[in-house]
Amino acid sequence: LTMHGRHEEALATGARGVALARERLGPADRETLRLTLNHARQLWFDASMTRATPFYEQTLAGYRTELAALPASAAPTYRSGLRSWIGTVASELTRLYWFNRTNLAPGDVPDQRDRAFEVAQLAHPSSSAEAISESVAQAIASRRGQGAAFDAWSQARTALAALDADIA
């Protein structure tokens, strides 16, 4: 439909597909997540970054849930690939938040920077550097009077990464 210039119809069909997948397969099903991410990207490309945001958020949450539920016996390459995929989605969502922040509609709440920072924190530590430079994040936190909170987060992240390595 999109290739024939019928963008709104394609977006409506995509939304309907996501809703059906959620209903029949569940929100954390791999196929549901694939459809949700494809729909988010189509919205971003064709229509509205603001409309795409919740679909990106749902996709990231679903993949993070999958990663958290992986048994210890899961193949390391699968776990690594999933972490990489989470980093990709987190990076796209962070760019979306930054774009939305600089293109606020009248009446929008300028919380996009905080949301982007949160996504960067929730991404796997190796992906955080890709999603947003730690030095830039620290500067932003310091300017907002949150330098101590940022330092605490950084220490907690380092401890969590060490614990993750010990468990693996």
Image (cartoon, helix red, strand yellow):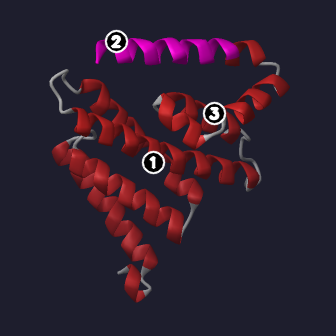
x then y, percent, for residue 87 = 45, 42
C-beta proximity under 8 Å, tags 3 and 1 = no
Kindly identify which residue carries mark 2. 166
Indicate which disc residue 88 carries: 1
Tell me how far mark 1 sits from mark 2, CA to CA.
Answer: 25 Å
What is the crowding at mark 2: few (fewer than 14 residues within 10 Å), some, or many (at least 20)? few
Q: Earlier in the sequence, mark 3 or mark 1?
A: 1
**Span of residues in magenta:** 151-168
- The amino acid pointed to by label 2 is Asp
Residue at point 76%, 18% (across, down): 146
- The amino acid pointed to by label 3 is Phe
Residue at point 28%, 33% (across, down): 66
Q: Earlier in the sequence, mark 3 or mark 2?
A: 3
Give 146 or 72, whichever is nearer the viewer: 72
Q: What type of secondary structure mainly makes up the magenta span?
A: helix
Kindly identify which residue carries mark 3. 117
